[in-house]
Amino acid sequence: MHSTSERYRQLPGYPLAGIRELRRQIEETGVDVIDLGSGDAELDPPPAVVARLREVAGDRSHSRYPYQSGLPAFREAITCWMARRFGVDVDPWKEVLPLIGSKEGLAHLPFAFVGPGHSAIIPDPGYRAYVGGVTLAGGNPHLVQLKASNEFLIPLDSVPSEVSARTRILYLNYPNNPTTAGASDEYYQEAIQFCQERGAVLAHDHAYSEIAFDGYRPRSVLEFDGAKSVALEFHSVSKTYNMTGWRLGWAVGNRELISALSTVKTFLDTGQYLGVQAAGVAALESWEAWVPGNVATFQSRRDKAVEAFQREGFKATLPKATLYLWIPVPTRESSEEFAWRALEEEGVIVLPGAALGSGGEGYFRVALTVGEDQLEQAAVRLGRLL
């Protein structure tokens, strides 16, 4: 029997580890399973992205090691996009770092700044990469519950002083997965000051910056005074361009932090395939013309799904951003029990809130990743559970 490390044993388990096998068994009985669990939309990337990859796939120069420098055109496209979208000027070589999806950057960041005796403040519920990276780096994940009473923000003034003094990273994610909440300008400024006073890194996961509705335009933390002294912001093409499997993102911000993350990655990977980075250039170039139509699709799905879930007796509200609904479990059971019953009895996969941390208990997440008809049918099926 092989012995695993203490840090490995500290990793949290996943409540629905057997869901894929159960889905297979249910589908074999002829049930059409509707999957609303994963944030992986059944939509196509921009045509220009696919065309660019086909164009460069046979180019020998794109098949060589990319290393951390990556494709110069991708760095430059990121720089131009940050200026157009947020009015933020960054150096493409010193303040930008291509990533193999934003997840790996978020998870690898603690290896540069966190060790035994250090803490990282992490939203609960939240993306599990934060907890995993901090745990494997030997640090202490300090989980702070996101509550409706606090507008699903981390109340920084409530962090215990002994934790605050040891904090090396503050993870934020707005628009937020899974709660769909946004952060105010005042909150960003408070977070920047919090990190400045403690010498901590502000790691802002901005994967949903472009999936926003009704005129809402999420801001970059780098737009605020002082942010470049403490912040790294993580972006991804996954949700914005329906490119989840392409694994492409970037970090942008403080140059010393960029350099440290790049050094860590040097020991762990040799960068994303240059052909995918070339496709990323095409994605960013298509942002202005293509993204609004994709967002309109998600907004239409949002409207249809909220209407359907409300009609079936759920307390669903219209989110301002992300591709999720965050719905209270309406029965006297745990979120995991509700999710298992949803699949076993009605053939619908939802994500129990507890799968993203104990702070998510009492809720389940619906991903707007299937068409309107399926979303409505899923609401009807789940309504039968009530």
Image (cartoon, helix red, strand yellow):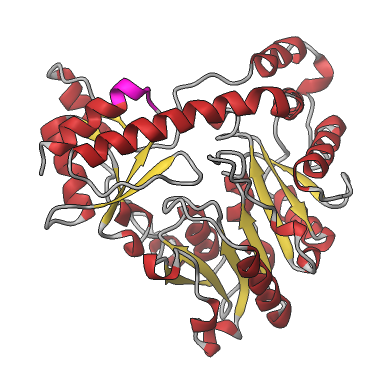
In the foreground, 63 or 109: 109
**Chief secondary structure of the magenta span?**
helix
Give the image quarter of residue 249: top right
Residue 254 in view, yes or no: yes
Residue 362 in percent (x, y) is at 25, 59
Residue 138 in percent (x, y) is at 54, 69
Q: Residue furthest bottom?
A: 161
Looking at the rendering, in which quadrant would you find the C terminus? top left
Q: Residue at x 17, y 48 (%)?
A: 338
Q: Residue at x 18, y 31 (%)?
A: 380
Provide the residue span drawn in magenta: 370-374
Looking at the rendering, in which quadrant would you find the N terminus? bottom left
Give the image quarter of residue 373: top left
Residue 114 in view, yes or no: no
Q: Residue at x 16, y 31 (%)?
A: 381
Q: Residue at x 70, y 76 (%)?
A: 193
